[in-house]
Image (spheres, rainbow, N blue to C red):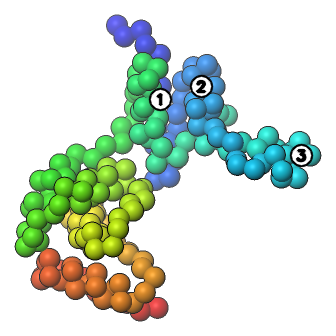
Amino acid sequence: MDSRPNIQITKIDNTHIRVDGEPSIRQELSDYFTFPVPGAKFMPSVKNKYWDGNIRLYAQTTGKLYLGLYYALEQFAKDREYKIDGYQWETDLETPDFTDNLNMGFPLRDYQVEAVSRAIKYRRQLLVSPTASGKSAIIYCVARHFISIHKKRVLVIVPTTSLVTKLLSTTTAAAPRSKASMTKS
């Protein structure tokens, strides 16, 4: 029998999970997912002692935690040798296989495959990539994943219409039979 303390996870919705455990574990979680706001000591609410100046991402009373922090929760449990039971947030996709099967007419570079992997694995991911590094191909691969695997529609928002045109041309070059379309608003 495993004597490690358990952390029980339940999915609430697409934004939150409920993380339950012994009171001491809940307190540790609260401390782990709390951080100070820079410059908070100068804010009137802190000066007047209405607020302590900390942001708490784990609500100890309800057990709510943002789903996007699942992997940080896994690391928390691993570092303390806690066992996680219940909901598992994973993708069963092998990204290199997925990107190879897209038949885009050109191979993705290693850093593009890594970016696609991270975007799919963590689902909520900020990817920073320099000019001319193939961001359109990364966007295309991530969009294709959610369209083909999860049967979801994809909305890509860009600041200029020239970027929309470029992305649309990349998409149609990579997949001539795709149903990609552009709508101006």
Label 2–label 1 contact, CB within 8 A: yes
Q: Residue furthest right?
A: 48
Question: Distance of mark 3 from mark 2, alpha carbons?
Answer: 27 Å
Q: Which mark is residue 76?
A: 1
Q: Quadrant of residue 159?
A: bottom left
Question: If you read the primary sequence from the N terminus, does the residue marked by circle 2 or circle 1 appear first?
Answer: 2
Is residue 149 found left or right of 39 in the rendered image? left
* Left or right: residue 75 compared with residue 117: right
Q: Nearer the viewer, residue 169 or 62?
A: 169
Amino acid found under the numbered disc labelled 3: Lys
Determine which residue is flagged by label 3. Answer: 47
Q: CA distance from mark 3 to mark 1?
A: 32 Å
| Total tally of numbered discs in the picture | 3
Estimate the spatial distance between the alpha carbons at disc 2 and disc 1, rounded to whole Å.
Answer: 9 Å
Look at the numbered disc 3 and give the secondary structure of its residue. Answer: helix
Residue at numbered disc 2: 28
